[in-house]
Image (spheres, grey):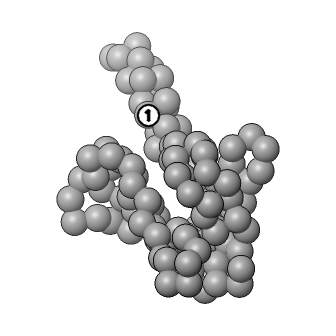
Amino acid sequence: MTKFALIFTLMTVPALTAAESFQVTLYQPTIVAGKQLKPGSYKVTLKEGAAMLSDGKQSVEAPVRVEATESKNIRTSVRFLNGDGTYKIDEIRIGKSSKKLVFENSTQAGS
């Protein structure tokens, strides 16, 4: 029984770690927390009410709320605000989960 519990724990730890971060691709220049990110692939890491987007060269941290979606997200998708000709992340729906990150847009408006 103890061996089974240890194996189960070891198998679930990577899954929990994977839920803490994921990849997202931006296809156009995008504003996050007042900073412009170039198009490319970014690692998104969640920590205590914030999302850190980094590509190895640059990174930006933005306040977010984690909310439940109506149904399970098939893939990761990004929704933007585009009222003034610039793209600002509004939310990211996390693929293979029922979660979305809602970005605090008031902190992004100062670009």
Q: Is residue 44 left or right of residue 100?
A: right
Q: Does residue 54 lie above or below 83 as drawn?
A: above
Residue 105 can be seen in this image = yes
Q: Is residue 10 left or right of residue 43?
A: left
Q: Is residue 64 left or right of residue 53?
A: left
Q: Position of residue 20 (x, y in %)?
A: 53, 46
Within 10 angstroms of label 1, few (less than 14), some, or many (20 or more) residues?
few
Classify the position of the N terminus by image quarter.
top left
Q: Position of residue 110 (x, y in %)?
A: 71, 84
Q: Does residue 71 lie above or below 104 as drawn?
A: above
The image shows a total of numbered marks equal to 1
Q: Is residue 38 left or right of residue 23?
A: right
Q: Position of residue 33 (x, y in %)?
A: 67, 72
Question: In the depicted view, which residue is nearer to us: 50 or 39?
Answer: 39
Q: Residue furthest top?
A: 3
Residue at 49 percent of width and 37 percent of height: 18
Q: Amino acid at mark 1?
A: Ala
Residue 45 can be seen in this image = no
Residue at 70 percent of width and 65 percent of height: 36
Q: Position of residue 78 (x, y in %)?
A: 43, 59
Residue at 55 percent of width and 78 percent of height: 85
Residue at 60 percent of width and 45 percent of height: 40
Question: In the depicted view, which residue is nearer to us: 47 or 102?
Answer: 102
The residue that label 1 is drawn on is 15
Q: Does residue 92 lie above or below 102 as drawn?
A: above
